[in-house]
Amino acid sequence: MGVPLPSGQIESPRGTLPDVSLTQMTDTRLGRTVAEVLDSEFSRLRAEGKKGLETLTGQARFLKIDKTALSRFRSGRRPLTRVRAEQISALLRTKAGRGEVDELADELVAARRVLAAHQVAVEKWFSNEELNESLLLVEFREPPAVRLDGPTQSLVDAVGTAIAKGLSYAMLFPFNLDAGAPRLPVPVRLYLAEVKDSLFETYYAIQNDLLLEVYEANRGKSDLNDKLSEATRRFRLYGLKTLPGDTNNQPADSRCPAIGYRLFFLKYRERDRAEQWEWVSANSVAPMIKKDSSKDELRAVAVRFSPIIEYWEQKHDLPTTAELLAFSEEIENQRGYRASLDLGEPLWEVIDKRSDEEIVGSFIQNQELPN
């Protein structure tokens, strides 16, 4: 494994990214952040007896905006326009005069953004232009570090933006918790159920942010739906499928042998170019660490994700479950073996059962974007 870089730095595919200190990202006058302003206002409203403002969902509903958009406003990833700031201020200060509403809007527009140095570094990693035509497979055996709620919420936007620009991003849950799958010890199963729940939460947050990014860039254009569909095909959540049983009708053992790390497998367009990264949390920082990997090790990891990688190399997007099965059969016919079973590779399936059309249709139907 590579040596961890100093706090605030990560190694990018083209070198080490510079350290960006916390003071570089904040207003020296120590004005409040958008999140701090909104938290103060919602605290006041709750004290006055207003119900349903305890969660981000309730707050978004109160402000009549999308939950992901509110998250982006709070993190500073999406700047507030004057019009939107005035709309929010008017909803928060319904009993106030115009001058007080304008004063709150002024503060929201001028609010500073605060990010820890390691968050800046990870954002820069995801903004690397080389990722725009690459495939990133991330295997989760513990809860995602990127969450919609909490200090890493801005990284949801960083990932969504990277996918909108062309990155293909596959989230992989290497376990099967279905009733027909091999039974796991109860403590392990309960832990993995929590991991899966948090994984779905992050998946939906990134998906919504991704589609919002594409929607805003193509709103009013005739090919908007096509652009949204293309983006949807670059982002999937996969899980292990229960493999066929043996002659005694016992299910095949598709358990993942270990838990406890996040693996990032980065595949570039160049045929033989790939890298392994790990996002390691330690001492309140979460650096991205590039692993020293031999060609054989990279090939072994790639086999574990087969045939998703081979499909992407040909199609440059990510397959549905049906497309993955059809592609496996195609490989079998070409090479004379069962690509996913005879070689011991896991058989993946898309966990989100909605079609691409349903995902896009649901997104458009539920949009409440700023004017």
Image: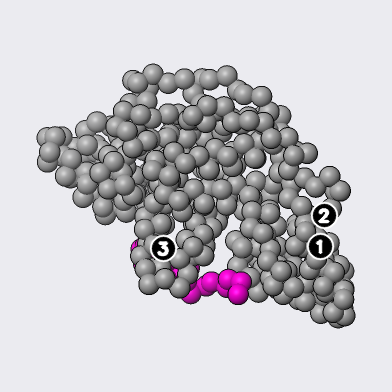
Answer yes or no: is residue 165 visible: yes
The label shown at residue 107 is 1
Q: Quadrant of residue 100?
A: bottom right
Is 150 left, or right, of 123 in this rendering?
right
Q: Amino acid at mark 2?
A: Arg
Q: Earlier in the sequence, mark 3 or mark 2?
A: 2
Residue 188 included in the magenta stretch of the image: no
Q: Is residue 311 above or below residue 295?
A: below
Q: Which mark is residue 228?
A: 3
Q: Residue, x 48% and y 33% (percent of image)?
A: 263
Left or right, 19 with respect to 305, comes to right
Residue at image point 78% right, 39% down: 23
Q: Mark 3: which amino acid?
A: Leu
Q: Which segment did they paint magenta? A: 353-371
Give left or right: position of 114 versus 172. right
Instruction: Tell me where residue 304 appears, x and y as whole percent.
Output: 34, 33
- How far apart marks 1 and 3 lie (CA) works out to 34 Å
